[in-house]
Image (tube, rainbow, N blue to C red):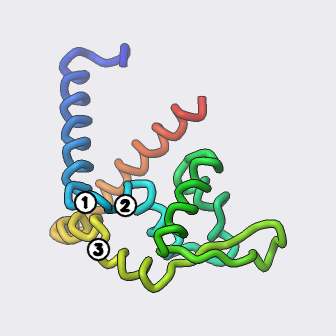
């Protein structure tokens, strides 16, 4: 951040703190036994992933996590009865995951539904700009972690 003036650094810091508050507000509905953020992300991923992508490797790429960490996340969801495991048709050594009936039911309680509902009040231009900015931030953070 050395390239920015002090006022720009304060604005950036304030914006980062606002973003943190937003993230906490989205997840604050969690119950004591509820899913962690990475588990919610995994459920969302497996609800959309095709047969070949519904693997630990696919989820790992999506989350930007190590395969070990991602494997533990998937295992915890299987143990909770939210995911089922099948041998992968395309690779006899791999397995694929799919949501169980309970997993689909839990997705109906997804904390992101509140945020999605609020975003529907933005016009198309605002949503497109917000998405573009979030994508840029996500890409830059991913790049920082890869260095």
Among the two numbered marks 2 and 3 on one chain, the one whose residue lies closer to the N terminus = 2
- Considering every residue shown, the one lying at the far bottom of the view is 101
For residue 35, the mark is 2
The residue at which mark 1 appears reads as 30
11 on left or right of 50: left
SS state under label 2: loop
Among the two numbered marks 2 and 1 on one chain, the one whose residue lies closer to the N terminus = 1
Q: Mark 2 packing: few (<14 Cα in 10 Å), some, or many (20+)?
A: some
- Along the viewing direction, whichever of 69 and 126 lies nearer the viewer: 69
Nearer to us of marks 2 and 3 is 2
Q: Mark 3 packing: few (<14 Cα in 10 Å), some, or many (20+)?
A: few
Quadrant of the snapshot with the C terminus: top right
- Considering every residue shown, the one lying at the far right of the view is 92
Among the two numbered marks 1 and 3 on one chain, the one whose residue lies closer to the N terminus = 1
Q: Position of residue 12 (x, y in %)?
A: 25, 30
Quadrant of the snapshot with the N terminus: top left
- Along the viewing direction, whichever of 140 and 101 lies nearer the viewer: 101
Q: Position of residue 54 (x, y in %)?
A: 62, 70
The residue at which mark 3 appears reads as 109
Residue at horizontal 35 percent and vertical 57 percent from the top: 131
Q: Mark 1 packing: few (<14 Cα in 10 Å), some, or many (20+)?
A: some
SS state under label 1: loop
SS state under label 3: loop
| 2 and 1 marks in contact (CB < 8 Å) | yes
15 on left or right of 107: left
**Label 1, label 3: how many angstroms apart (C-alpha)?**
10 Å
Q: Position of residue 114 (x, y in %)?
A: 21, 67
**Label 2, label 3: how many angstroms apart (C-alpha)?**
11 Å
Residue at horizontal 58 percent and vertical 60 percent from the top: 59
107 on left or right of 83: left
């Amino acid at each position: 951040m050395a390239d920015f003036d002090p006022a720009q650094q304060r604005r950036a810091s304030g914006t980062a703190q606002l973003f943190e508050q937003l993230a906490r507000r989205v997840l604050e509905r969690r119950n004591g036994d509820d899913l962690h953020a990475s588990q919610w992300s995994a459920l969302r991923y497996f609800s959309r992933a095709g047969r070949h992508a519904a693997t630990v490797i696919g989820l790992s790429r999506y989350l930007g996590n190590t395969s070990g960490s991602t494997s533990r996340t998937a295992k915890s969801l299987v143990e909770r009865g939210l995911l089922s495991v099948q041998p992968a048709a395309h690779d006899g050594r791999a397995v694929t995951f799919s949501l169980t009936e309970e997993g689909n039911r839990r997705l109906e309680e997804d904390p992101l539904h509140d945020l999605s509902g609020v975003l529907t009040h933005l016009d198309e231009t605002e949503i497109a700009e917000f998405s573009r900015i979030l994508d840029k931030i996500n890409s830059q953070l991913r790049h920082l972690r890869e260095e």
